Amino acid sequence: MSEHFELLDIYKAIVSLIAGLILGFEREMKDKSAGLKTITVICLGSTLFSILSYKLAGQGDPTRIASYIVSGIGFLGAGVIFKSGFTVYGLTTAGIIWIAAAIGMSIGFGEIYIAFTFLISALIIMYTAGFLTKHYLPQKHNKILKLTLSSEHFFKKEEILAEIKNISKEAHEIAFEKQGNLLFITLDLHVTTKGIQNLEHYLLQNKDLAAFSY
């Protein structure tokens, strides 16, 4: 047993633990489904698989076992992605699971400097993306707006759509339904942050609308 044990493995485990805690802390603070414990365990597990792959390969390919981490972690990441209506959630968490596994593998193979280079890079984008988006990128949002009209107000439809198109950058009608005495209109909008406020004010003030949601 001692021939496979090295003090370096303990160092790798400690470094992997630290890297996992750093990555997991950001998700935990945002109360995401994969938080501190999950990200840390993923990082540690990837490190362990990499160490075993390296030690047990002998004269063979040391990446044989570790290569399955890449495909296996994909299934785990897919588990935190879910869709609600037209909106997809969990993509960032899935990406962090992916990078945590990659960093863990790098540590397991002894590439500590590479691991921390990419750990720091990941942290930079995680903590600055909001600031960069807010100050340097156009503040446009994609919204799926659902309007409800009574049949007796159908003649108001074009007027309402024209006003919404004036407020939004783009507006496309993607569905039109009728259930009983109610009409349901679904719009795909591209609207600025300020435009959202104007849109909400218009929708709230419009007495011809029975209901709306987005």
Image: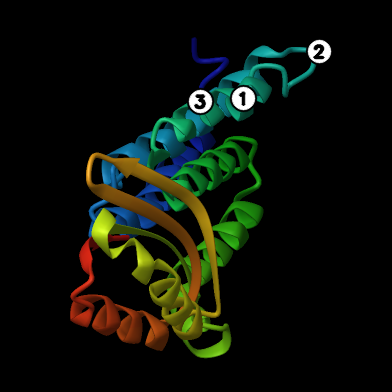
Give neighbour class at mark 2: few <14, some 14-19, many 20+ (Cα, 10 Å).
Answer: few
Q: Which residue is mark 1?
A: 71
- Helix, strand or loop at disc 2? loop
- In-image side of 33 versus 72 (left or right): left
Q: Can you say whether 109 is above or below 32 in the image?
A: above
- Front residue of 170 and 140: 170
Looking at the image, how many numbered discs can be counted on the residues? 3
- In-image side of 152 versus 157 (left or right): left
The answer to whether mark 3 and mark 1 are in CB contact below 8 A is yes
- In-image side of 154 versus 67 (left or right): left
Q: Can you say whether 198 is above or below 13 in the image?
A: below
Spot occupied by residue 133 in the image (x, y as percentages of width and height): 51, 79
Q: Which residue is mark 2?
A: 59
Q: Which residue is mark 3?
A: 75
* Amino acid type indicated by mark 3: Phe
- Helix, strand or loop at disc 3? helix
Spot occupied by residue 199 in the image (x, y as percentages of width and height): 34, 80
Give neighbour class at mark 1: few <14, some 14-19, many 20+ (Cα, 10 Å).
Answer: few
Q: Can you say whether 164 is above or below 24 in the image?
A: below
* Amino acid type indicated by mark 1: Ser
* Amino acid type indicated by mark 2: Gln
**Residue drawn where x is 71% and y is 14% of the image:** 57
- Helix, strand or loop at disc 1? helix
Decide which of tag 3 and tag 2 comes sooner along the chain: 2
**Residue drawn where x is 45% and y is 84% of the image:** 167
Q: Nearer the viewer, mark 3 or mark 2?
A: 3
- Front residue of 53 and 127: 127
Spot occupied by residue 58 in the image (x, y as percentages of width and height): 74, 12
Location of the C terminus by quadrant is: bottom left
Decide which of tag 1 and tag 2 comes sooner along the chain: 2
Residue 201's quadrant in the figure?
bottom left
Q: Nearer the viewer, mark 1 or mark 2?
A: 1
